[in-house]
Image (cartoon, coloured by chain):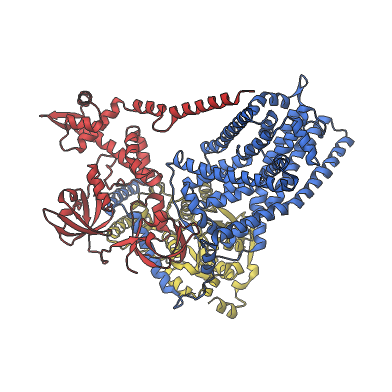
Chain colours: A red, B blue, C yellow
Amino acid sequence: MVNPLFALLIAAAVTVLGFYVFSPERGLFWKWQHTRELSERVLREDALKHIYHAKNASVESLAGALSISTNQVADVIEGLQSLELLEIEVSNFKLTSDGRDYALRIIRAHRLYERYLAEETGYDEVNWHEKAHQLEHELSSEDVEALAQKLGNPTHDPHGDPIPTADGKMVYSEKRTRLANLELDERARIIHLEDEPEAVYAQLVAEGLHIGQEIRLLEATPQRIRFETGAGEHLLAPILAANISVIPFAEEPEKELEVGLPLSDLEIGEEREVLSLSPRIRGAERRRLMDLGILPGTMIEAEMESAGGDPVAYRVRGAVIALRKDQAAMISVSAEA
Amino acid sequence: MTTENTQSLENILSTAQTLRWEVGIDFHEKVTESIYTDAARIADRATTRPEEKPRFDFDRKLDQILTSRVWGFPLMLALLMIVFWLTISGANVPSSMLATLLLDTIHPLLKGFAATIGMPWWLDGFLFDGVYMATAWVISVMLPPMAIFFPLFTLLEDFGYLPRVAFNLDNMFRKSGAHGKQALSMTMGFGCNAAGVVATRIIDSPRERLIAIITNNFALCNGRWPTQILIASLFIGALVPVQLAGLVSSMAVVGIALLGIFLTFASSKFLSKTWLKGEVSTFSLELPPYRPPRIWQTIYTSLIDRTFIILWRAIIFAIPAGAVLWLSANITIAGTSLAGYLINFLNPFGLLLGLNGVILVAFIVAIPANEIVVPTIMMLTVLVTGANGGEGAGVMFELESGMETMALFEAGGWTLLTAVNLMLFSLIHNPCSTTIYTIYKETGSKKWTWVAALAPVLMGFAVTFVVAQVWRLVEMIL
Amino acid sequence: MTTNTKDSCETCPIHDAAALKKLGVDMSDFDYVVALAGNPNTGKSTVFNALTGLRQHTGNWPGKTVSRAEGGFEYGDHKYKLVDLPGTYSLLATSLDEEVARDFILFGQPDVTIVVVDATRLERNLNLVLQVLEITNRVVVALNLMDEAKRHGIQVDERRLARDLGVPVVPMVARQGEGVPELLQAVGEVANRKTVGKPYRVKYDSPELKKAVTEVTKQIENAYPELPNPQWVALRLLDGDERIAEALRKGELGDLTHGDIEKRSAQLQVIGNQ
């Protein structure tokens, strides 16, 4: 018979080793895979994207964006030039039309994949960018078209950015404008929140702003921009507000803009009107809730709490439907009965 | 199709494509809103509702009790215990009647028949001792509890109570990344894992459904309860004075079932955080109005839908198992049977896990149906040790008294550790082939079928290994 | 309403109980295909069982009928094949159930689609009815659970409803078999074209939607004048539904019911196997 202590030690050693090699993200196996991915092509594609987006890209900004040394950047630039994707005019980088097309293809893959992650998977918002960033280099153009078809040829990514079409067109709506350009008291819908720089984006998110939200401009001066949404009144410096893009309503909507409260705040027996579903309810979940009849304008009554306390059942259009608290928190209802 | 038509179609498609940019991102929302607005208007015109809400609303009153913080859980536990009690105690009588009929009456008749027509011993043994005995065993152990459990369960379902159970328990399941409705597929799994896997259809969220399917095996099924009860009463019950034996051994069995529930939650959480992280997850649960169930129809349909389908599958799988078992015990090479070789080969590994070769072989043979684990172990132990008793090589049997059974196991070199690990391994091992097949049918994925089949077996190896080694270590130190 | 007809018309053909012959699973040589749709918990399988004499059990859950159940019945010299679709809240193809149901109504081209509706939750159930009406006008609405409605003091004016929806509406208590003869009669009349529905069309009034829907619908009407459901097709195209675009290309949409029953059952098979 094997000595039990000895057997346990061997088993423990095997487990630790296995963990060290295969543990997700940090294991040796994954690290090895990751370095393999950082090929020349990937760097070139990332550089194209950066130059396409940035107003005045430089060697330094490239080094920062790709997190490589300036020497490596020089190699990448050289490669791009030899492929006739990039021209250098006076110290300014300029994409050739081939380079532009190439960049748009990558952007298309990235945004489509983000859309896919948002609609058809359970990954958290925080994981989208990184996953899409990896996949954008791996998807062939057939893969991308198949993906587009599967998703019903979506027009926008989950952040509200338009997805370039297969023939390299990217349409920004003509009506799209900056928040500060609205007339006073004019109402509009947020269609985009710029996610860079990160600190600014975080501040906008902290204000409770999101795509699809109704907004009404109250005051615009060089010092400050004051506006109102369903989440309350907001006050921002113009430089921050510049990161909010909106589309004004075609016709003035009949209903007043209302400041609501989360559905999860209702006491049992209270009945309210649904104002909106946060965009954080997405994909299959969003469609399911809407098919169940939870839509803006619907009357909803908190009916009972479960014995476990968490799901709460609501009476909606004659049926009793249980929702979890974190779901209910993302549904906004009128503050007054 | 004419070219002209094709042309206009492409025009239409491109118009649609352009207009989509203007419609914007919440297309689905606007469409649904329009439909519901019209539906509400039409419904409103056609319906007259009473002026005031009725003072007494039966549904509401009943819900207030069944989902209340005070009464919700106790009532639920009481109802489930009644269902299990009715199943276990109600199944005893028909089970032993079936056993008497199939094993003690028909089997000798078949043997006698074979002797009269002069059937060669190997054909007689193969057909009646191998194939027939295994099938008869499975039917007599499996049919009665399922025929009681499923109709009861279906009655609760039709009445509308089960959605309330899911509602009450969702909080616990949510914390491990699962859906409240998993409570129902899990409970169904206590009857039969294959039925539990089918029952996951009620979960409409892909991730939570996969979790429920993969973890259903940890609900201790009907085929494994008898093993647990027998081993616990022989070994665990023997540790305490006779008056307490019954209580302690049933506590041990309940402990194993609770461990199974714990493992369900733990592995649900693990799956939702790792492999299934990227699967779509949604939650919605409609609580339908209570409706009086139609009792006879329910009994009829649940027998057809659930009991017989599953029994049929089990029989299909039991036939080859009986055949393989009989053949492996009767084909000998150089004086040792095939089973003997396999047992000797697996014995060192079995001992490392605190089990033995016989038990591992029995679990392999019993992949088609967990019901035959104990009779197979007994048969193989007789084969290996040459102890007295039994009906001959490859024939399953039952011993009349616990004393005899205990003596047989002791002859096979069993200790308390063997018994404890057998109970653990019976809980934590691969699902039976009926369940594996059902998982494949339900998921349509080879990958998830493999995960569901192999992960529990590996866990079982790990658990029994650690228990065995720590046990021996403690024994050495003491 | 129901009781009225009963008293006044004991000898009408619709009360000839013998006219219904339940054929169970025997579906050989059927003349008409009937689809059975409805929300979960509306008593859809009770209606199915009442018509076919089968004992389908689906339980109190959405998504229970993952595979379609089929049965047959004979009524007034014609044999009908009845197909039980999964219970769904909607047909916007967001789940597998909904896709199966939608594809059957669209491509299977049933001669009649019965939509079972819960009289106590009319608004929620009409959501599905309106979506079915967008696809086909051969619809009979079975207004089930009238007894529950009565118990809750809810009165439903089925004539008004029939007028608004533009298709026959039959009040029922399927558990007790009430309304089954009337349902059979309505189904028979729609199947042999004695009744032709003028289905209600949803008004897509939101400003952004209206323009797009009108424009695409107009173009489709011009290109495919024979298509029974241009507005619905327009909506699907605007939603980027590649499957519908593909079906238009292959000429799979449009009225196939005049065609060969054999060809149609081949189509049904294809959908069944998905």
The part of the image, by quadrant, that contains residue A293 is bottom left
Q: Residue at x 25, y 31 (%)?
A: A66
Q: Is residue A211 above or below residue C161?
A: above
The part of the image, by quadrant, that contains residue C24 is bottom right
Name the residue nearer the viewer: B457 or A245.
Answer: B457
Residue A196 seen in this snapshot:
no
Q: Residue at x 77, y 27 (%)?
A: B385
Name the residue nearer the viewer: A31 or A130.
Answer: A31
Q: Is residue B306 above or below residue C21?
A: above
Q: Position of A111 compared to B444: left or right?
A: left
Residue sitting farthest toward the front: B478
Residue B264 place in picture, x, y as percent? 54, 44
Name the residue nearer the viewer: C61 or A204.
Answer: A204
Residue A142 place in picture, x, y as percent? 36, 35
The quadrant of the picture occupied by the N terminus of chain A is top right
Residue C72 place in picture, x, y as percent? 61, 58
Residue B208 seen in this snapshot:
yes
Q: Residue at x 35, y 65 (%)?
A: A273
Q: Position of C111 compared to B100: left or right?
A: left
Residue sitting farthest toward the top: B334
Residue sitting farthest toward the bottom: C8
Residue sitting farthest toward the right: B116
